[in-house]
Image (cartoon, helix red, strand yellow):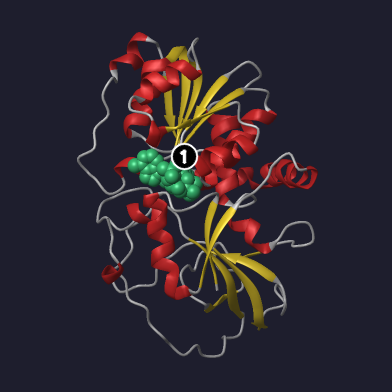
Amino acid sequence: MPVADDFEQATVTLPKPEPGAVQVRNQWMSVDPYMRGRMRDVKSYLPPFALGEVMQGGAVGTVMTSNDPRLKEGDTVVSMFGWREAFNAPADAPGLMKVDTTALAPEMYLGVAGLTGLTAYLGVQEVANVKQGDVVFISAAAGAVGSVACQIAKIQGATVIGSAGGAEKVEFVRSLGVDTVIDYKAEPDLTAALQRAAPQGISVYFDNVGGAHLEAALAVAKPFARFALCGMIDGANDSASAVHGLVSIVRKRLRLEGFITSDRFDQIPRFLGEMVPWIGSGKIKSAQTVDQGIEHAVDAFLKLFHGGNVGKMLVKL
Ligand SMILES: NC(=O)c1ccc[n+]([C@@H]2O[C@H](COP(=O)([O-])OP(=O)(O)OC[C@H]3O[C@@H](n4cnc5c(N)ncnc54)[C@H](OP(=O)(O)O)[C@@H]3O)[C@@H](O)[C@H]2O)c1
C-alpha cells in the first residue's frame, strides 16, 4: 500500500504560455486505481510513472489564457496532465479536449461521462454483450465503474447482482435499481452468498476486483458464461494474490476477456450519444465522493483501496 511519504507536493511558478499553447486552471482531478499499477516498474499497457515527475491522470479545468485560436479563454477542457492545479500545454496536446458543459457538469467528464462511464459501457455492451435475460454479477458495484455498469446492465434488461462493502454502499447500489446486493464484508462465504442470489447461476460477470469475487463468479457461472475482466483491485497492493478454481473455465466453457478502455477511444462519440440522454432522462444516476484541495490528493487516492468512496472519487481544486 502506498503511503503519504511516497509523494511530494511541489510549488512551481508557471510561465506565460508559448504561442500555440494555453494555460489551464484545473477545477477537478481524478484519482484512479490504475495509477497504482503505474507505480510498479514493470512493462504494461502504459509506462510506469517516472520518479520525481508529476502524476499523470485525468483533470477538468478552465482555459485562463489562450495563444491559439482552437481554444478560447473560458473554455472547459479535459486533460491528462494530472495532479496539478494549473498547467501550460500546446492547444493540440494529446488528451486535451474542449467539452460541452451545457448539459453536463464539468466533473461528470471525469466520471459517468468520462473514462469511467466509457469503461462500464464497453464492458457491459461490447465485451460481455449483456442482453435481456442475462443474470449479471458486478463487483465493486458502489464504485465509479461498477455503479455505472450496474445501471447500463439494467437498461439492457438484465437481472443484476451487485457486490459492495458495507450497509451504506448496499443501500446506494439498491437505489440504482440493482435487483440483489451482496455486502461481501458481512458474508463469511462469498460463493455461498452469490449462489443464494443466483440459484440458476450467473451468465455474465463484470470483474472490478479479482480475488475471492472472481473465484465466486467462476464457481457460480452457468456454462458458456461471459466474463468482462475490467480490473483486479484486490491484488493491486499484493503481488502474491492468487485465484483458485480456474478449471471451471474449461469445464463450463467460459469466455474471459480483459479489456482496456484506452484501446477503444473510437467509441467515445457512440458512448456519449447514448450516455448524455441516459443522464438527462435520469436512467443513469451519478454519484461522487469529493475531497477538497490538492494537498488531499494522496488521501483521496488511497481511499480507493480502503473502500472510502461511493461512486467516482474526485479531488476538487
Ligand atoms: N480496464 C480498464 O480500462 C479500466 C478503466 C477504469 C477502471 N478500471 C478498473 O475498474 C475497477 C474499478 O475502478 P474505479 O475507478 O471504478 O474504482 P472504484 O470502484 O470507484 O473504487 C475502488 C473500489 O474497489 C473496492 N475495493 C477495494 N479493494 C477491494 C478488495 N480488496 N476487495 C473488494 N473490493 C475492493 C472498494 O469498494 P468496496 O467498499 O465495495 O470494497 C473501492 O471503493 C478497478 O479495478 C480499476 O482498475 C479498469
Please name whichever residue, 277 or 135, is drawn nearer the observer in this view of the structure.
Answer: 135
Confirm whether residue 232 shows in the render: no
Which quadrant, please, contains the N terminus? bottom left
- In terms of depth relative to the viewer, which is nearer, 266 or 174? 174
Hey, which residue is sitting farthest left in the picture?
Answer: 240
Query: Within the image, what quadrant is residue 35 found in?
Result: bottom left
Which corner quadrant of the figure contains ligand 1?
A: top left
Q: Secondary structure at mark 1?
A: loop
Circle 1 residue: 140
Instruction: Give the x, y percent position of residue 299.
Output: 40, 64
Q: Is residue 167 visible?
A: yes
Amino acid residing under circle 1: Ala
Q: Position of residue 116 (x, y in %)?
A: 55, 48
Residue at 76%, 43% (x, y): give it.
282
In-front residue for pair 232/159: 159
> Where, by quadrant of the figure, is residue 176 drawn?
top right
Residue 161 % position (x, y): 53, 26
